[in-house]
Image: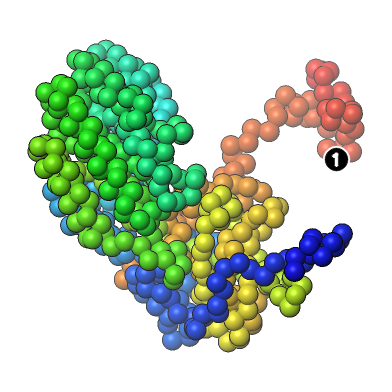
Amino acid sequence: MRAHEAGALHAEVAEPPALPLRPPADLDSLAPHVWPATARRGPDGEIRVGGVDLRAVAAEFGTPCYVIDETDFRSRCRRWRTAFEGATVYYAAKALLTLGIARWVADEQLGLDVCTGDELAVALRAGVDPARIVFHGNNKSDAELRTALQAGVGRIVIDAFAELRRLAALGAELGVRPDVLIRVTVGVEAHTHEFIATAHEDQKFGFSLAGGQALAAVTEALGATSLRLVGLHSHIGSQIFDTAGFEVAAHRVVGLLRTIRDQHGIELPELNLGGGVGVAYTADDDPVDVAEFAAQVRAIVERECAAAGLAVPRLAVEPGRAIAGPPVLTVYRVGTVKPVDLGGGFVRTYVSVDGGMSDNIRAALYDAAYTCALANRRAAGEPILARVVGKHCEAGDIVVRDTFVSADIQDGDLLAVPVTGAYCRSLASNYNYLGRPPLVAVRDGRARLLVRRETIDDLLRLDLGDDLNRGECTASEDTPPDTRTHDRAGVRSGAAEPAE
Ligand SMILES: Cc1ncc(COP(=O)(O)O)c(C=O)c1O
Ligand SMILES: N[C@@H](CCCC[NH3+])C(=O)O
């Protein structure tokens, strides 16, 4: 019985965890569909990735630390390229972007999807061929559009009428005619978290298909002499396992291609179906295989086009998570270990690590599930119910909501959390002044830094203090800083008086 049903006025007794929480048969196993492809346990029970001992990574680069299995990342790029042979695969940079990552993607002959001028700047700095870049965004500024046009970006995906007009004007001004696509909101309710579904009507992206805006945008783009409309774009959301959503989306956008042909006598040559393919975060997840996904998508589009009497357009896809997510794990150092009695015979052990929502906000933001394993040794105790939490001043600072850890877990152990490549570093913050962790690439027994750790000096370099007050303070150096008085508004007394 729940505490409130029993009329208890004081603290509620927590419900037993709702998940089908069975202790795993083996706390040390590293499910191959979850962990980086080269992750193995070494002779001391330590986890090694790319032939590198994570204890050595922690010793050299500190914790928390993102570790990327380069071989896994590159082979995912290749798998997508092969599965979508004849189509364009743009890696979605928002998932994880650094100069090194952009170069790997370019080496593997994938294009790049960017959605801000700053992502574009990183891609260009990395030497990515601008012609292989697609530029997204629901609020591109004139400056961003101008940079994209001047750089010769391959495709720009138009997201609003105002943008269409601004881009047409800029194209005319600069004497260029960019290839553009119209982003269509196809009205699919993708089976994923509300915050990462993007094709239902009531959200900020794209032109509504049902409301006729998409066709109106196409008509306007076709009439703009400084734009070359080459296709349609649809992205239904992220972390999707059920391919039915893509099927409905393809059906609807091909329907629009047909209407465009009927009304304008033009067959648009490109169809970009966006990203969104989900990955396994825990051993229970069963994501779609890329080759199968590609075959299904092609079959759907071919069938729909045949039915509409259209030539099959060139396809494009934009995987982010499916490429960047699984090759990365985060190594944390365990600190406080605190058993909390939940009542009713339940104890949950809170395992605090030295990072948290600043390096992985996904559990806090999307209730995302993760798993973890001891990285420095094998488990030597019984499995105990645990929650891995960060060190931030926030109760929702959770890294792994429900998991089992070894009963002998202790301060100083290393804990690895897999599948942290996508939307972890890219959504990282400096909450509580924690510097963002480094990104270390491992391959063939060697580890090297792709991005170093942010230090307090890095952060303070941006903080200009308050020069005005500093000048005044300097002028009255006889007053030690911590004994200066403050008025009730919290303003240092005398601050309004100019220093002599
Ligand atoms: C337009 C677009 N393309 C691609 C992606 C990448 O999605 P995912 O990382 O789920 O593959 C996103 C993000 O959801 C997106 O908004
Ligand atoms: N940030 C989301 C995905 C957003 C996809 C970008 N459009 C996540 O972590 O799952």
User: Does the rendering let one see residue 367?
Assistant: yes
Residue 340, placed above or below residue 110: below
Tell me the residue at 89%/29% (across/down).
488
* Quadrant housing the C terminus: top right
Q: Secondary structure at mark 1?
A: helix
Q: Is residue 80 above or below residue 90?
A: below
- Which quadrant holds residue 77? bottom left
Q: Compare residues 132 and 442 and report the one nearer the observer.
A: 132
Q: Which residue is mark 1?
A: 482
Residue 465 coordinates in the image, percent (x, y): 68, 33
| Label 1 environment density (alpha carbons within 10 Å; few <14, some 14–19, many ≥20) | few
Residue drawn at x 48%, y 50% is 193
Q: Where is residue 480, by image quadrant?
A: top right
Q: Is residue 334 above or below residue 136?
A: below
In the visual, does 341 lie left or right of 484? Answer: left
Number of numbered tags placed on the structure image: 1
- In the displayed structure, does residue 189 sit left or right of residue 153? right
